[in-house]
Every structure is written in structure tokens, then in C-alpha cells.
């Protein structure tokens, strides 16, 4: 892991070395209010807080996650460094109890860059997955641990319309799997009016991942939601979202199993 972090810093030293005009033509801010690289709406492993119900099944999913941008610097071309962390839980519902099926933990650091309508993010992330106690007697537990690099490129046609693509490489996979994966997606936000003293927007998003693991898989995710937010805020709010997922499970203990479901729940951006 130490070698991977050193490699990450060396490969991306251009993010960290200021321009020759840095002193005269740059500004630095710490813990800025907004990250340079916006979150991916339909990516099921984007750090955010959410609670959803799987339609047609007595199952729930919960997520607690956040991106913290530690610093930004530069004028015109802005650069940033931050950290991300998230926990994802998959639960059954049995009466008034909710036994845990699986919990996944993600933690990473990233460098970001933004110039005009284009932004990029290069991240290093550690992932682990743990089988819930409720399934110890039903399914064999596996040791699941991974570390990855991922590069994402994004372009905004307007402030509310976005396209992105990316590629990633797992530098460590337990159990051992093929390391490459690729990702494309888009999102759009349409203002609908006002309610409860706030603005209402219709958010739509699509995310597609090709993973070279488990004999190859395409994971597609679609989101359609109504978001209540402050006037003009395209990043934050509370969203009532209908979701669809089809592919192999994003939960590590089940990554070889096919997963197809509709969900309904709340997302907090």
C-alpha cells in the first residue's frame, strides 16, 4: 500500500507543482464549500447519504458518505486535493428487525482539476467488504479487499447537464480478479418550479460500468428523482429518487452474483 501511495504522488506530481506564475496569479482556499469535481448522480458507489427500499423485496440499503475537499488553488485553472469516505449497508427486513447482509467500506484520496466546462479527478481508493452476521450460516464469507486508481473526465454542456467517462485499475484484488474497469455516464437537472419555499428540480442520471472481473460484466444504473433545494443550487438538496440497477452486485461479498432491482428512497446531497 505504501508503494502505491508513492506511485500515486509521483505520477500526478503535475497536480501538485504550481505554475511559474503561482505567487502572482493564484489563490488558495482551505476546506472550500464546493468540490471542483461534482459527484456522479447515478453511480451507486458515489459517497453520499441515502436510504432506499428495494421494491418487491423486504430489503433496504443505507449509505453514509462524504467528499471533503481539503484545499483548492490556482486561478483560471483550479486544482484541488481532498479525501472521500463511505459505508454502504444492505439489510433484510424481518418484522421490526433489520439483519445485515453486507457492509462495504470505501476510503480514498484524490486530486482534481477544473478549467472552464471540463474537470478531471484522479483518485486512489481502498475498499473492503464484510458479510453480515445474519448470513454466516447461509453463505460462505470471503476475504474481500481492494485498492484502485481511477481517472474520471467530465464536461458540462450547461451548469445542469453533464457527461463523463473514466477508467480504473485495481492494483490489489483479494480474491484475485482481472483489474481493469471502464465507466461512462451522464446527468441532467431540469427546474420545475417552487414548493415549500424551495426550488424543485427533476434530476436524471445514467451510469454504465464495464468490469473485467467475474468473467466480465456490464453494470447499468439509472436514477430519476425530484430534488428540493435552494434557488439556483445545482449541487445540494434532498432527492426522492426512483432507481434501477442491472448487473453484478456492487456489494463485495456478492460481486459474482447477478443483481437486478428497482429502488425507491431518499438521497441527501
Image (cartoon, rainbow, N blue to C red):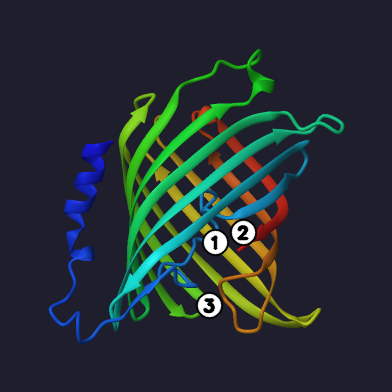
The spot of residue 198 in percent (x, y) is 74, 80
Q: Residue at x 19, y 46 (%)?
A: 7
Q: Residue furthest left?
A: 20
Most extreme residue toward the right is: 95
Quarter of the image for residue 96 reads: top right
In terms of sequence position, does the residue under pointer 1 or pointer 2 come before the other?
1
Q: Is residue 16 or residue 52 the one in the foreground? A: 16
Q: Is residue 213 visible?
A: no
Is 241 displayed left or right of 142 in the figure? right
| Position of residue 210 in the picture relative to residue 131 (left or right) | left
Inter-mark Cα distance, 3 to 1: 12 Å
Please give the label number shown on residue 199: none
Residue 261: x percent and y percent?
A: 66, 43
Quadrant location of residue 234?
A: bottom right
Q: Are marks 1 and 2 in contact (CB under 8 Å)?
A: yes
Q: Which residue is mark 1?
A: 41
Q: Which residue is mark 3?
A: 160
Q: Nearer the viewer, residue 61 or 155?
A: 61
Q: Is residue 115 above or below residue 57?
A: below
Where residue 39 sits: x, y (%)?
A: 49, 63
Q: Secondary structure at mark 1?
A: loop
Helix or strand or loop: what does disc 3 sit on?
loop
Give the number of the mark in front: 1 or 2.
1
Q: Which mark is residue 223?
A: 2
Amino acid at each position: 500500500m505504501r508503494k502505491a501511495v508513492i506511485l500515486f504522488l509521483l505520477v500526478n506530481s503535475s497536480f501538485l507543482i504550481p505554475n511559474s506564475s503561482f505567487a502572482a496569479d493564484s489563490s488558495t482556499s482551505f476546506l472550500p464549500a464546493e468540490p471542483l469535481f461534482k459527484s456522479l448522480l447515478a453511480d451507486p458507489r458515489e459517497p453520499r447519504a441515502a436510504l432506499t427500499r428495494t421494491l418487491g423485496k423486504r430489503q433496504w440499503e443505507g449509505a453514509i458518505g462524504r467528499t471533503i475537499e481539503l484545499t483548492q488553488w490556482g486561478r483560471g485553472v483550479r486544482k484541488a486535493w481532498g479525501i472521500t469516505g463511505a459505508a454502504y449497508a444492505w439489510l433484510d427486513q424481518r418484522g421490526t428487525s433489520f439483519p445485515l447482509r453486507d457492509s462495504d467500506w470505501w476510503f480514498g484520496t484524490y486530486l482534481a482539476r477544473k478549467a472552464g466546462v471540463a474537470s478531471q479527478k484522479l483518485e486512489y481508493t481502498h475498499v473492503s467488504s464484510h458479510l453480515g452476521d445474519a448470513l454466516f450460516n447461509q453463505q460462505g464469507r470471503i476475504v474481500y479487499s481492494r485498492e484502485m486508481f481511477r481517472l474520471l473526465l467530465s464536461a458540462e454542456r450547461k451548469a445542469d447537464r453533464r457527461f463523463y467517462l473514466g477508467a480504473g485499475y485495481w492494483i490489489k484484488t483479494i480474491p484475485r480478479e482481472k483489474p481493469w474497469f471502464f465507466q461512462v455516464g451522464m446527468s441532467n437537472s431540469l427546474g420545475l418550479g417552487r414548493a415549500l419555499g424551495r426550488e424543485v428540480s427533476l434530476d436524471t442520471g445514467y451510469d454504465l460500468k464495464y468490469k473485467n472481473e467475474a468473467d466480465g460484466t456490464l453494470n447499468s444504473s439509472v436514477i430519476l428523482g425530484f430534488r428540493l433545494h435552494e434557488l439556483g443550487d445545482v449541487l445540494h438538496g434532498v432527492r426522492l429518487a426512483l432507481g434501477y440497477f442491472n448487473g453484478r452486485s456492487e456489494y463485495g461479498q456478492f460481486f459474482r452474483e447477478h443483481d437486478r432491482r428497482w429502488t425507491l428512497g431518499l438521497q441527501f446531497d
